[in-house]
Image (cartoon, rainbow, N blue to C red):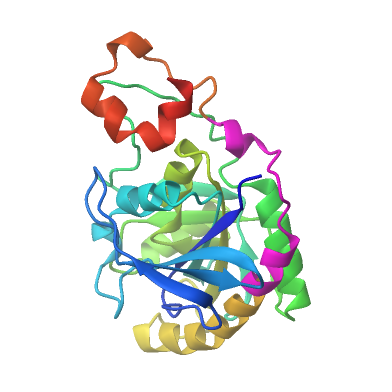
Amino acid sequence: MTEKIVGVIGGSGLYEMEGLEEVQTVSLTTPFGDPSDSLVLGRLEGVKVAFLPRHGKGHRIQPSSLNFRANIYAMKVLGVEWIIGVSAVGSMKEDIHPGDMVIPNQFIDRTVGRPNTFFSDGVVCHISFADPVCPHLSQILAQAGHEAGAIVHPGGTYLCIEGPQFSTRAESRLYRTWGVDIIGMTNLPEAKLAREAEICYATIAFATDYDCWHQEAEDVSIGEVLRILALSAKTAKSVIRTALKHLPEKRDCLCATALKYALITNKKLIPEKTKKDLEPIIGKYL
């Protein structure tokens, strides 16, 4: 049986994973360019882990400039079957307090112009994305959060905005009328691409503020965001450690076969270069 490999994409405040054993650093390039940084491979709780800082070491890359395709492709090449995305978000609900942990199960896309599919250049694919995160991984992360002593909100809608600016007050109030739970800038493109790559994906989101809709709370400042994230990062690492112990040996979710009926293009008409570039993703179906 192939050994399971878990990918961790660290967001603001989570730039490394302490405690990794048998550590090695891998630099990859992909048909879509370079990932945000080198990937760090190692073992944590006996499980093989591939860690990538989403914004690069030192937080160098803003959300609009992230090469999401290269990041997820690199994970696929390494054999990753599960990805845990850690992220800082704003709370859009009174009962989601700064420092709380949210495991969203839905997304709304307000980004513009971000490449968020592997399929172009002569191949068409339409994946099912009604349920955009892996339910099994999400449940494991929620339980791990409880075990770590976090205040956990299982489920909820993540509104993904373009950034890098935070919302205006008018935007924030509008988004609240949509019933969203949290707001961020990064996780939806990852979820889309992970599903196309047949990788299970779920998000650990830590609320750092009330965006700017809350009249009695201070407006968003990056200093306060990072202060709370520094506290949340310790919890995130504990949650990940615990979750690794509970992942099953074999996946039986729909994520693992997302492309089975989704490739539309006649296989004979797919350009050879496209076949070569996408071999790690679609090779088994060709």
Q: Left of 146 or right of it: where is 40?
A: left
Image quadrant occupied by the C terminus: top left
Q: Left of 206 or right of it: where is 16?
A: left
Asked if 252 appears above or below 98 in the picture, the reply is above
Residue 192's spot in the image, x, y percent? 45, 43
Can residue 161 be seen at all in this image of the molecule? Answer: yes
The stretch in magenta equals 240-258
Asked if 269 appears above or below 211 in the picture, the reply is above
Looking at the rendering, which quadrant does residue 150 occupy? bottom right
Residue 15, magenta (yes or no): no
Residue 155's spot in the image, x, y percent? 67, 56
Of 78 and 137, nearer the camera is 78
Residue shown at 68%/47% (left/top)? Answer: 135
Residue shown at 48%/68% (left/top)? Answer: 87
Residue shown at 53%/77% (left/top)? Answer: 20
Can residue 210 be seen at all in this image of the molecule? Answer: no
Asked if 69 appears above or below 263 in the picture, the reply is below
Image quadrant occupied by the N terminus: top right
Of 95 and 264, nearer the camera is 264
Residue 256, magenta (yes or no): yes
